[in-house]
Image (cartoon, grey):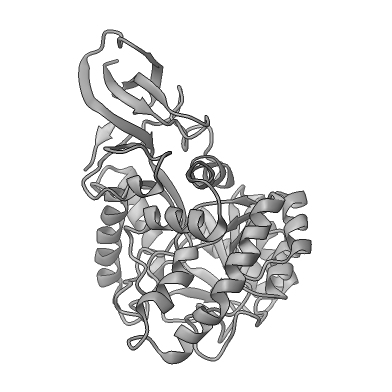
Amino acid sequence: MTQTAFFNFTLFDGKTDQNESDTWFTTNDQTGKIVNRGTGTAPKADHWIDLQGQYVMPGFINVHTHITSDPNTFDGNSGDSETEAAVTAYKNLQTMLKSGVTYIRECGTSYDVDIKLNRLKKKGLLDHTPTMMPSGRAFSMTGGHGDGPHFSFLVDSPDEMRKAVRQGLKNGAENIKMMATGGVMTPGDFMADPQLSTIEMKTGIDEAHHKGKIVAAHAEGNPGIQNAIDAGVDSIEHGFYVNEQEAQQMIKQGTYLTPTIIALWAIPEYGRGTLPAWEVKKADDAAEDAYRNLSRAFKLGVKFTCGTDAGTPYNGFDTTPKELELMTEKLSITPLQAYKCSSINSASLCHIEDEYGTLEIGKFADFQVLKNDPLADVKACQQSDKQVYLHGKREF
């Protein structure tokens, strides 16, 4: 076993509440995991990497991405062939890793491209890309949010949901994504429109949980948010109109919430005059209500995760650091609280907390190296030329 010693840096490990100065850790070059850690002089190792007094923090876990989408096309690349979608996805994955995202959970992908790319990743054939939890295609009702070419299983009864989820799991999905409400990007429906029913979702959730897989629900308004919580989803995605009763139920059930603030913020911020007026209006009308509702849910104790909905209009694959800034700005939380949404809560949601999320002995050495202190200024994470390491190997 050969080892690499990283030394001469200030560490925020993602778990504690403060930095640790003059830190070192050693990694197993074969497994990519941290085997020892301390301060002062590092022990002997086969390789040495001096991080020159910079700041080290965990790589981000982004639990809501759409890697086959292009944020500059505004239609999600709905006309792409599978080959085009795969090339787009590969480039988007590289962009995410460069921004500091070392692990993603997909939430709906055309042609099951993420499942297929993940197979290549495990064979070592997908360079400079984060670790993936693939979802494959999403699950939508006919005519609902996500009903687009090659993007969703269309299900209109509990039996259809059961069969479709079983097929998705057979295909290789590790996360099941369901559409409980309408959405900002879909013409003719609204955030308040309930779509998949509670019984349809519960049927699919039971199938996923039987296989030890997790389920996410796109749920922006009510009664769809309530339907998804009642059905037993593992995470509510967006949750813009979550109310106090729902928040209390989520706390009791252990349901996570992924706010995807940047997806809502970017549309009115950049889309006026280029996006359809109805789409901008839906996002604009919801924004202040969403920030207020999400802030209340966080303060009540709902566990928030980190996800961007990357691939939606003007929402690129390098925006995870901006999402963290918006969480601090719109929800009035600290940088530390925002980072823990990624390092601790996102890892826990995905059931990967034993190996990912924080920089502790026994976990993968997935980290980013910054010039400035991320605990002092959340914008430090937006550094464009940061170093990014995956399993102890430098990728950017």
Height in image: 15 above or below 59? Answer: above
Residue 219 in view in this figure = no
Above or below — where is 384 with respect to 179?
above
Depth check: give the residue in front, 106 or 24: 24
Above or below, comparing residue 80 to residue 393 in the picture: below
Q: Position of residue 279 (x, y in %)?
A: 46, 85
Q: Where is residue 299 in the image (x, y as percent from the top left)?
A: 67, 52
**How many numbered discs?**
0
Q: Residue drawn at (35%, 77%), measured in percent from left and top? A: 270
Q: Tell me where residue 3 sits by quadrant.
A: top left
Give the camera-side residue of 207 and 96. Answer: 96
Side of 36 where 91 appears, left or right: left
Residue 102 spot, x, y in % from top left:
36, 44
User: Where 30 falls versus 131 (above or below)?
Assistant: above
- In this orientation, does residue 298 appear? yes
Residue visible at 21% across and 43% down in the picture: 396
Q: Tell me the quarter of the image containing the N terminus.
A: top left
Residue 23 in which image quadrant: top left
The percent position of residue 208, horizontal first and vertical second, equals 62, 56
Tell me the residue at 67%/57% (across/down).
297
